[in-house]
Image: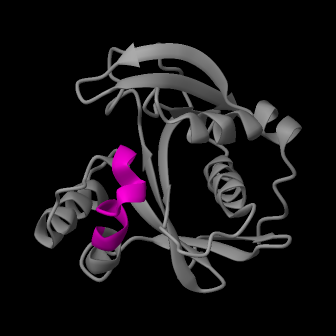
Amino acid sequence: MNRFTRTAPGIGDLAIRPLDPDADAALLHAWVTHPKAAYWMMQDADLDAVRSEYRRITEHPHHDAWLGLLDGTPAFLVERYDPARLELVGLYDAEPGDVGMHFLCAPSDTPVHGFTRAVITTVMAFLFADPATRRVVVEPDVRNTAVHTLNAAVGFDVVGPIDKPEKQALLSVCTRAAFERTTTAGAAR
């Protein structure tokens, strides 16, 4: 059952449904170990490690994972977490209503112009569909300039670099107002 849907003009119908760590493990394994997913830091993970990681995430009270679909076909991954309890504890000043996010588009041999922007816009609309969400917080690798550009396009403001155990990250936040001001999110159905 889809939890969120949105039509992206020129791209298609995007939907987000809960991830099933067992049924979706092989698909996720192919995505997270692909060379284009280097910043996901799972390049050497085997199928069992991916399944275990996503079981851990889906069973965690402050972390969850979602599978994104394009016209019914799996096309992206979303993780949502509480940054006051995971990932960013002690690394920034958390505020009530903060939601952490990661997203990954499936690798493709035939990229579609505008797809990644449609995905991040959909992910943000999905997160802000929850009235309790006041800000979305991200911490991509400082070297991932492509995602910094996408983040800016949907309203993220850079807070600055932070040192995490696994990487130097560029902490950025996006308020609901900034997202609405910088995008045309489309109607959620």
Name the quadrant of the C terminus.
bottom right
Residue 60 in the image: above or below residue 147: below
Find residue 88 and report its horizontal and vertical position in percent. 36, 25
Image: magenta residue range? 29-39
- Is residue 178 visible to the viewer in this orientation of the structure? yes
Left or right: 22 in relation to 141: left
Q: Is residue 37 located in the magenta-colored stretch of the structure? A: yes
| Residue drawn at (17%, 57%) of the image | 44
- Main secondary structure of the magenta stretch: helix
Left or right: 64 in relation to 59: right
Residue 53 in the image: above or below residue 181: below
| Extreme residue toward the bottom, this view | 72
Viewer-nearest residue: 151 or 108: 108
Query: For residue 164, which quarter of the picture?
Result: top left
| Residue drawn at (52%, 72%) of the image | 108
Q: Is residue 19 located in the magenta-colored stretch of the structure? A: no
Viewer-nearest residue: 102 or 175: 102
Coloring scheme used: one colour
Left or right: 189 in relation to 48: right
Left or right: 43 in relation to 17: left
- Counting labels gives 0
Find residue 116 and report its horizontal and vertical position in percent. 65, 58
| Residue drawn at (12%, 70%) of the image | 48
Find residue 66 and report its horizontal and vertical position in percent. 45, 64
Find residue 93 and report its horizontal and vertical position in percent. 47, 13
- Is residue 64 visible to the viewer in this orientation of the structure? no
